[in-house]
Amino acid sequence: MTVETKTTFCRICEPLCGMIATVEDGKLLSLRPDKENPASSGFSCQKGIAFADVHNDPDRLITPMRRTPSGEFEPVDWDTAMADIAERVRAIHRAHGSGALGWYFGNPGAFSYSHVLWLLMLSLGFGSRLHLFTAGSQDINSRFVASQLLYGNSVTMPIPDIPRTDLLVVIGANPVVSHGSGVTIPRIRDHMKAVVKRGGRVLVIDPRRTETAADFEWLGIAPDGDAFLLLSLLQVMFEEGLIDRARLAEQASGAAWLEQLARPFTPESTQEHTGIDPGAVRQLARDLVVADRSVVYGRVGTCLGQNGTLTTYLLDVVNLAAGNLGRAGGSMFGSLGMPGERFAMKAVGALLGSVYRRRRSRIGGFPSVLASEPAGIMAKEITTPGRGQIRALFVGAGNPVLSVPNGNELEAAFAQLDLMVGIDLYVNETLAHCDYVLPATTMYERDDFMIPFAMLRPAPFRQVTEAVTAPAGQARQEWQIIDDLTSRLGDLTPGLRLIEGMRRTLAVFGSRLQPRLFVDALIRLSEGGDRFRLRRRGLTFDRLSHEYPHGKVLAEHLPEVPLSHSVSYLNGRVRLQHKDIETEVASLVARTHDPRFPMRLIGMREARSENSWMHNVPMLMRGGRVQRALIHAYDADRLGVATDDLLTINSAQGEIEVPAQVSKDILPGVVAVPHGWGHRRRAGWNTANANPGANVNLLMSSEPDDLEALAGMARLNGVPVRIQRA
Ligand SMILES: Nc1nc2c(c(=O)[nH]1)N[C@H]1C(S)=C(S)[C@@H](COP(=O)(O)OP(=O)(O)OC[C@H]3O[C@@H](n4cnc5c(=O)[nH]c(N)nc54)[C@H](O)[C@@H]3O)O[C@H]1N2
Ligand SMILES: Nc1nc2c(c(=O)[nH]1)N[C@H]1C(S)=C(S)[C@@H](COP(=O)(O)OP(=O)(O)OC[C@H]3O[C@@H](n4cnc5c(=O)[nH]c(N)nc54)[C@H](O)[C@@H]3O)O[C@H]1N2
Ligand code: SF4
Ligand SMILES: [Mo]
């Protein structure tokens, strides 16, 4: 018997906490937080530790499976499965073209560089007509579009410099539970506590007195009222002369237009939409400007409303107006520190901008965000006849039946597909519909380096990990599966022929086309890298792995550079004026109210869930844990409801039943329901199915008119509902 410990890091959520894996005879025994990781220094949450039970779950899929005519799954060998899948893709492509193929890329996929890179390769191989859907239209695409408008680049991401700020205003995020999103700061709660300890403030603006609000100051806001609040903050800043106009004119174009836009939104006029006292809004506007270093930060709560792109745009504009954009202790921009990066970012920004403006989805005419379409229209892309109708769908690391609006519509649509293939750790509610389900490795069965998150750290840091164990059973990495598929289809399209050519050329030199080549190059070229041996002690993937297993801190803080360095527009100035923003402001003002649905539904993340996929771990389900709908005592009294009574929640779209939790930690008129529940017997996770809960997204609309206009965001927060005792 050999017992080893291996240093690695967790990739369930964004802080990427350092972990120590104990491995016995090649089997993952347990996980514990890594005290020597300089960023997370001994922190991990319960999910991170419980992941060993996902890894070793008896319900885990470790053999490829094929659906039989009777509807059951039977094991099949990889070669038979891949040969049949490739043959069917080939036939569909021959008959209908690339537009007949769809791919849904779920959230855990973003935590694997090799999965991302090889999916990118596949989509280049099939050309621009492949339908790509991601979890982003239920998450962060509004952030990308706001950045495209403001900075001329979708991937330019502002991050709150929490370690150096004096006033942090959190609008629509719950970092104490989520551990931070859109920013990678391990121990984020400690960093927020440190703001207060050094005499600063943390203010949480949220319809619910969340775990984060309970730790700091709370200001309640009516769901989806944020754009009104932010416009009022701007109105006050302009009216009271709080803005340094010379600086604003230097950093941005369109200031006069912005002033006009904000002018009607006095705090008195927006109070009916926000529920916030005008005096408090004025004070907040002054505080943001007067504080030496302040930052407004928002995430899922501001991205997923009716006007998520506008709201996200306004968050940044408030930071800009207060003089805190691109400043230490304000909202900053990370970079990889590569030679020529600023120039490359301008090119990338221009390309993404033109894709955004030019490519439109077949259904609803939505712009393309990082080459993807809104997942909300996926069902209709499958069922609507015509050129570009999807006939084959791949789902990798996702569970859209539970995570996107109107899963019922999606399930019905799947029945029309000629081919459906899933790649996952489990047969989840979505994969239950597949013709083939293919077993993926877990994160501890693959090497990794987190490309997107490397740019989201206020303290630049690099860490890589090797695989901690060999793959269980016949599990394979996603990139290997994609690689197998593309090489079987190497003659199908010009793009695939090009990839096949590269593969053959490298083989001549005894090398293999694989994602690690690319990520190693990225590490070598970026800050701290060896620049291909130009720097003697510089970093490579292997050196990080051998010499810095716990990770390497590159700098304590981000460098302060002129804001123009982070802007991809040629003139280096933030662009405020956009017709689309004007249209969104007009739609904000024109919002209507349906008296049949007087309450507002919001989401609620739970410490022991990760979206839909950790409910099969007994350790996380202990104590008779169930999904509950949180309502205020005032509403409970009015409706004659007590905790544990079953509630019926209706929206214009659907109906669910969930037991109530009565509380004072939420505004009256608001109901909060966690997503990711609604497990079914059809899916292959036994613990989760025993305590299924309800799919809150059955209340959400997938009608194109109901998706947010600029980014195709599903409207998952502030949804009008009616509740009553079941
Ligand atoms: N434990 C746990 N951690 C997670 C996840 C998980 O499922 N469980 N999921 C991960 C993922 S995929 C993500 S994207 C991140 C998300 O990270 P966060 O965005 O920090 O997490 P949420 O809990 O969704 O926070 C959204 C907050 O917005 C509030 N809110 C809702 N509507 C409104 C509104 O209209 N206005 C305002 N001001 N607030 C509103 C909600 O009450 C909630 O507190 O978390 C990640 N981390
Ligand atoms: N109402 C409401 N709905 C929401 C949200 C909300 O706040 N409210 N949040 C939205 C957000 S932010 C997100 S990110 C989405 C998530 O939406 P999805 O990504 O569609 O769904 P998940 O529940 O994260 O499912 C992830 C799947 O990946 C599998 N998996 C885990 N690790 C791996 C791996 O390494 N490889 C492979 N191949 N599979 C793996 C899991 O078993 C699981 O089946 O949900 C969205 N839906
Ligand atoms: S906070 Fe996120 S990254 Fe850290 S241990 Fe928990 S799940 Fe893993
Ligand atoms: Mo997410």
Image (cartoon, rainbow, N blue to C red):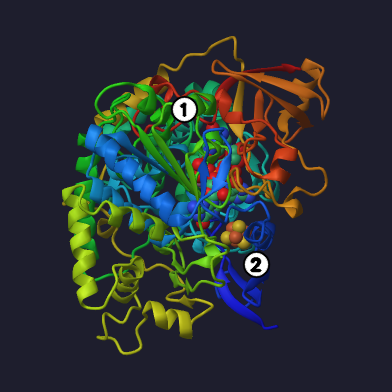
Picture coordinates of residue 59, whole percent (x, y):
66, 51
Element type at marker 2?
Answer: loop
For the residues labelled 2 and 1, the Cα–Cα distance comes to 45 Å
Element type at marker 1?
Answer: loop
Q: Which residue is mark 2?
A: 43
Q: Nearer the viewer, residue 354 or 569?
A: 354
Residue 200 occupies which quadrant of the picture? Answer: bottom right
Which amino acid type is shown beneath numbered disc 2? Phe
| First in residue order: circle 2 vs circle 1 | 2
Looking at the image, which residue is at 27% across and 80% down?
531
Q: Nearer the viewer, residue 32 or 120?
A: 120
Would you place residue 372 above or below residue 114 in this image?
A: above
Looking at the image, which residue is at 29% across and 44% down?
148
Which amino acid type is shown beneath numbered disc 1? Ala
| Residue behind label 2 places its C-beta within 8 angstroms of ligand 3 | yes
Q: Which label is found at residue 415?
A: 1
| Residue 33 visible from this viewpoint | no
How busy is the neighbourhood of tag 2: few (under 14 within 10 Å), some, or many (20 plus)?
A: some
Q: Nearer the viewer, residue 365 or 72?
A: 72
